[in-house]
Amino acid sequence: MSARFWSSLLLPVVLLGVAIATFLVTEPLSLLGVSPPPIEQLTVERTVLDEEGIDLKVRATGSEPMHIAQVLVDGAYWRFTQEPAGALGRGTSAWIHLPYPWVEDELHEITFITNTGATFDHTIEVAEATPQASAAQFIGYGLLGLYVGVLPVALGILFRPALQQSGPRGFEFALALTLGLLVFLLVDTLEEGLELGDQAASIFQGHALVWLAALVAFVALMAVGRRHREPPRGLALASYLALGIGLHNLGEGLAIGGSFAAGSAALGTFLVIGFTLHNLTEGIGIAAPLTRERVRWVAWIGLIALAGLPAVLGTWIGAYAYAPHWSALLLGIGAGAILQVMIEVGDFLRRTSIASGGAMISVASISGFTAGIVIMYATAYFVQV
Amino acid sequence: MKLPMFNRRGFLKSGFWGAVGSLLGLGGHATADSKSYSMHGGMSEPTSSGGMMTVGEVDHARNGFDPSIVLSDWDTGKVGRLPNGQPLREYTIVALDKEVEIAPGVFFPAWTYNGRVPGPSLRAMEGDRIRIRFINQGSHTHTMHFHGIHSARMDGIPGAGEVAPGESFTYEFDALPFGCHLYHCHSVPLKRHIHKGLYGAFIVDPDPSRHPEHADVARSRVLGSEENQPWQEFVMVMNGFDTNFDEENEVYAVNTVAHAYANHPIRIARERPVRVYLVNVTEFDPVNSLHLHANFFDYYDHGTTLTPTLRTVDTVIQCQGQRGILEFSFADHEPGLYMFHAHQSEFVELGWMGFFEVVE
């Protein structure tokens, strides 16, 4: 590269620095006659309850460093320690340790008071001891993930022989059903992601994070999938399906692990069985594009793992290392991945319909699409609290 | 969970006004009553509070007033005599905006009389002529409205003795009736002007010559008299602070600083009687109260009688603006820490709790 290239790259950056420095020195905002008041924001990212009391991970996103001066628990000033101590700069986090005798199954209200007298509330809806990373509990959460992720996908794939018996219209029906399923998953993943985005500290711009991660993931996966200028089909298409579904299941795992850990999974067993039933359709979806292919059993195991195991990972993360902004990012990526497979499955459906002398829009495809959405919506009944 | 909150930094000028105040000989510490005990050096952290405490210490020097000194810091004014022979007491009060640390690390943008909350505890003798030069150096219009007997012109309400920023007014009236009274700002909006810190105690000692039937009792209340010497007298202004302006208090206290007397218990000599001038100026809550542990007291509502209006009680409630005198003794008790607090648990948990440290 020439010196001219580098200097033209450097000049705007240097000028920007000069402009910022000038702004800071001359303070043109003072001409407006207002001194913009600092804005304070505090977000609780994690809540840990144990026999020592209550620990909260807080993240400050004030326009100036914030000082947590006092902490109230249930309307009472309580002794606390902050780690690390001192002012919380923009975007930084700290742990607040409260030696508070919390009451199991009851609600606790925490209020942070900053040096300016501003208050920030955090509600612990149902106080439950936070899971300690014991081997037994770790396995327990893992099993939970297997039940809601791996098991239903594997069972759904067992429908494949039935799909093979059902002729071209049946094949189209199954592909359209997969599309319907994906539409539901897309909506669900986006909703979940945006909800987590709301919980994240404002500095992470939760909603933008979800939408942009979805867009980038979608474009990237489309590019990778069509790198040979051919839409993916067969095992490749099934793999993308498994990836998209897997990322969605990761989100479900996060929700399940998080809610069990936070004590808000009131329905317990019912919830797990509900998810198992709900996710059965995902297995059918993965099997659909492979109806007419010969697939080795190792490949099947790989597909099941790709689609199901993220649920296990999700329950662990949800239970032990929950951070709303990371979860929102993962779900955004998941939404993008689902959108990519929707395009590819739709394309596959169109081509197979035409090849078999039909059209993409047919009685079989419309009824399959509708059935996919209805089945997902109806089985979601079991997992809504 | 994410509530944008606007900081209030309009009070950086307090340093400037503090300097003005000290130039005028205001603010800062008046010399404590010579007979009062030093309140310092008590237990810094009574274990009996459990974990339910504010964390840290308030910087009283920066505030310019120390609750332990405020307890018995009487402002008796400049004493003189009118041509007709009537005793005259002259006071100067300056309204100032000032940021006050009301709990460790929590700063409240207060409006103050003489840079402190509560304002100076004005003390006079029944029948004295009171002359108060009130200078408003604050950012809003203020008044001084006294609970007492005076003319309409001297009432300190909008239209009668209200003072715009930068101006002044002189209130003049006779100190009547004797008792435990208060003064506060009566500008509107009323809630805001009071709860921002514009209030203080106004104590009128009974003139023994006017009350021959209870002359001894009256004399014991006269500051500086021989009969008054054994008494350990404290002023306690029950107040609260709504730091986020949602019309609910985040901090409750006596004399402003949350847990001040829990961190530094009020020292009491066991043998000598105790008299507390209790005033309630708490905003937003209809009543406040004081409960004394392990002891009972006699209570004089408004302090306008020389015989108790309530005998042998351990809890008294006061509505907003109500006040009275508590008299009790720890002579028959063993030394130790004796708690006192509002008997609204909510207020206790938000800072209104302290200890008497009874010593030999």
Image (cartoon, coloured by chain):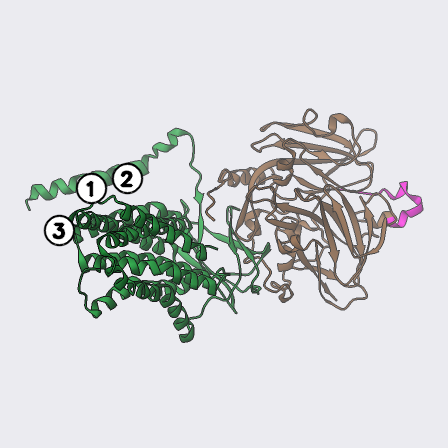
Q: Nearer the viewer, mark 1 or mark 3?
A: 3
Q: CA distance from mark 1 to mark 3?
A: 42 Å
**In the rendered structure, which amino acid carries the disc numbered 3?**
Glu
Q: In the rendering, which numbered label is found on residue A230? A: 3
Q: Nearer the viewer, residue A94 or A52?
A: A52
Q: Mark 1 and 2 residues: CB-CB less than 8 Å, in contact?
A: no
Residue A263 rendering spot, x and y as whole percentages: 50, 62
1 or 3: tag closer to the N-terminus: 1
Residue B248 rendering spot, x and y as whole percentages: 61, 44
Discs 1 and 2 share one subunit: yes
Residue at x-position 44% and y-position 42% = A39
**In the rendered structure, which amino acid carries the disc numbered 2?**
Ala
Q: Colour of chain A?
A: green
Q: Chain of mark 1?
A: A
Residue B41 rendering spot, x and y as whole percentages: 63, 62
Reading the image, the residue beneath label 2 is A21
Q: Nearer the viewer, mark 1 or mark 2?
A: 1
| Residue A242 appears anywhere in the view | no
Q: Nearer the viewer, mark 2 or mark 3?
A: 3
Q: In the rendering, which numbered label is found on residue A318? A: none
Reading the image, the residue beneath label 1 is A13
Q: Nearer the viewer, residue B123 or B279?
A: B279
**In the rendered structure, which amino acid carries the disc numbered 1?**
Val
1 or 2: tag closer to the N-terminus: 1
Residue A354 included in the magenta stretch of the image = no
User: Is B124 placed left or right of A245 in the picture?
Assistant: right
Which range is magenta?
Answer: B203-217
